[in-house]
Image: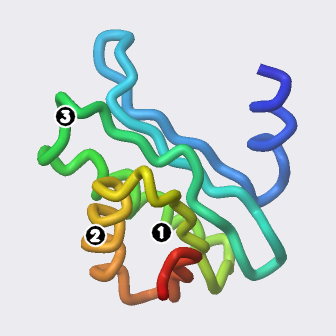
Amino acid sequence: MEYFSDTYEQAGCKFWVIEKNGWILGTVSLVRITDETVKFRKMYVDENYHGRGYGYYLLKTAVDTAISLNYHEIALETVHTMHEAHMTLKKNYKSFKHIWIHDKNRN
């Protein structure tokens, strides 16, 4: 847990968990890169809870928080082995018009 504290207790970093009866349904975090940029990390929704709006809620919470903290860019970084997650994120984050999101893997 030391790594967790070192990363997420810094100014401008946030971490959210959706929990039900002690079971983690989903997570997302923002990690500060610069004074104007944060990145999504630890974006996860349990596969048994896909399609129920939890991912959208987590993204909305993260984007709204980034805006309130005066960030102007959110970096979206996924790896090619997470294709399904990447496509879901791309579909959902396009509805957030308030902030430009950089997709590291975009060609």
On residue 64, the disc is 1
Tell me if mark 1 has few (under 14), some (14-19) or many (20+) residues whose alpha carbon lies within 10 angstroms of its own.
some
- Say which residue label 2 marks: 92
Where residue 58 sits: x, y (%)? 38, 52
- Looking at the image, which residue sits at the far left? 51
Q: Position of residue 43 (x, y in %)?
A: 47, 48
Q: Residue at x 47, y 34 (%)?
A: 17
Identity of the residue drawn at 54% across and 69% down = 76
For label 2, the SS is helix
Q: Tell me which numbered mark, 2 or 1, is placed earlier along the sequence.
A: 1
Find residue 9 and report its horizontal and vertical position in percent.
80, 41
Residue type at mark 2: give it.
Asn
C-alpha separation, residue under disc 2 versus residue under disc 1: 14 Å
Q: Nearer the viewer, mark 2 or mark 1?
A: 2
Disc 1 element: helix
Q: Is residue 3 left or right of residue 21?
A: right
Q: Is residue 100 left or right of residue 71?
A: left
Q: Is residue 40 left or right of residue 107?
A: right
Task: Pick whichever, 7 or 64, lies toward us.
Answer: 7
Residue receiving disc 3 = 49
